[in-house]
Amino acid sequence: MTRKANSLRNMPDLNGRFGEFGGRFVAETLMPLILNVEKSYEKAIKNKKFIEKLDTYRRDFIGRPSPLYFAERLTKFFGGAKIYFKRDELNHTGAHKINNVIGQILLAKMMGKRNIIAETGAGQHGVATATACALFGYQCDVFMGISDIERQKPNVQRMKLLGAKIHPVNSGTATLKDAMNEALRYWVSNADSHFYIIGTVAGPHPYPKMVRDFQSIIGEETKKQILEKEGKLPNTLIACIGGGSNAIGLFHPFLDNHEVELIGVEAAGKGLRSGKHASSINAGKQGVLHGNKTYLLQDKFGQIDDAHSISAGLDYPGIGPEHSWLNDIGRVKYLSATDSESIKAFKLCSKLEGIIPALEPAHALHVTGKIARERNKNNILIMNMCGRGDKDLPSVLPILEKKKL
Ligand SMILES: *Cc1c(COP(=O)(O)O)cnc(C)c1O
């Protein structure tokens, strides 16, 4: 890969920094593992066979390329800009997570590691990893907080069926951040045989870069597809943000197209002032968690605060370090949507397009609708439909019934 001077796509630097963010804040014992992953990864992406394998699994197992779809009825409904969906919910296992998992498991294979570790919150990354492990015949250890195990039963059942072993995590708030701490600990004590597949653009360098690179297929396809359909680049790209992997995957190939506006949507939960949200950029402070420096939800003593969102996939108290940097240099705007705004968008999309979105992209859809209304019909918006909503019916239906929505 040639590096263009002054490109925003050259980050991170050799120390894994995005400006002041990112880096590698890990225990000495973890350092050799991380350095080994970095070295192997840099070798892999220059290896023609590795890239060919990745392309084959993308096409034949994941089902890529995913379509770019003109959402005609929603466009009419909002009465302004043209709305397109990048249909990553059509991927095998129902979300974008598998794009990254297939890349990392191929790397594990190249490194001779046959045992895979993963953390999971909602269970989507756990399911994607258990799926890939079944495909490769590898052992899969998934760390999951006990609160999440209770909240996400169907995904726990899917992981077990696929052959994964679930390690319940009791510490802290028994949710995603604690599962990730435990997974990192387990990795240190099983270093020789195990590879840790992180599910979003977080963790110590090289994970934020590596996960971004594997997810960038979303933006690369989008660029080609919109040029074919419209003969020009879009005005605006919109994606929801948990840790930030589907968003950076869509944005990254467009970072140097400065005329294309980029918008990330955080979960505002019950409102930014309620204290019950997951908006690390809009309402967090700088700190260090899971091996990198970034914006985090924290109290005045610097302890990590609990995140809240109706959507389990956005329920993370941090954000990938590249997003923190893109926010501070002003290249990406970070807005937010509340639980109830997202539920309305969830219902609207199901009724008007015949697509039941996951609650995560329903956050992005709320903001997409607001922007579409303010623009004229020559304006083009593309939203990443990063997951399907079947998994969300048990949590959404009772709310819809109660509110008679
Ligand atoms: C996991 C997940 C997210 C959040 O993760 P990112 O790394 O921010 O993409 C969003 N949407 C869906 C459908 C997910 O499964």
Image (spheres, rainbow, N blue to C red):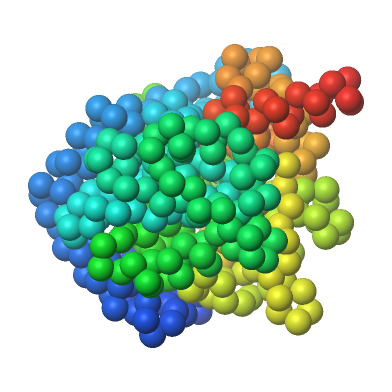
Direction right: furthest residue? 403
Left/right of residue 381 with respect to residue 46 in the rendered view: right
- 33 or 324: nearer the eye? 33
User: On screen, 279 above or below 291?
Assistant: above
- 219 or 372: nearer the eye? 219
Q: Where is residue 396 in the image (x, y as percent from the top left)?
A: 74, 29
In what quadrant of the picture does the N terminus appear? Answer: bottom left
User: On screen, 304 above or below 166?
Assistant: below
In what quadrant of the picture does the C terminus appear? Answer: top right
Direction bottom: furthest residue? 28
- 379 or 48: nearer the eye? 48
Q: Where is residue 236 in the image (x, y as percent from the top left)?
A: 54, 42
**What residue is drawn where x is 38% and y is 72%?**
188
Task: Find residue 10 and report its image quarter.
Answer: bottom left
Where does ligand 1 appear, by image quarter? top right
Q: Is residue 321 visible?
A: no
User: On screen, 329 above or below 350?
Assistant: below
**What residue is drawn where x is 71% and y is 57%?**
307
Left/right of residue 48 with respect to residue 315 in the rendered view: left
Q: Can residue 110 be seen in this view?
A: yes
Exactly how many numbered labels are in the figure? Answer: 0
Left/right of residue 131 with respect to residue 185 in the rendered view: left
Q: Position of residue 393 (x, y in %)?
A: 67, 25
**What residue is drawn where x is 37% and y is 48%?**
140
**What residue is drawn where x is 65% and y is 19%?**
350
Q: Position of residue 134 (x, y in %)?
A: 31, 37
Left/right of residue 66 with respect to residue 46 in the rendered view: right
- 252 or 236: nearer the eye? 252
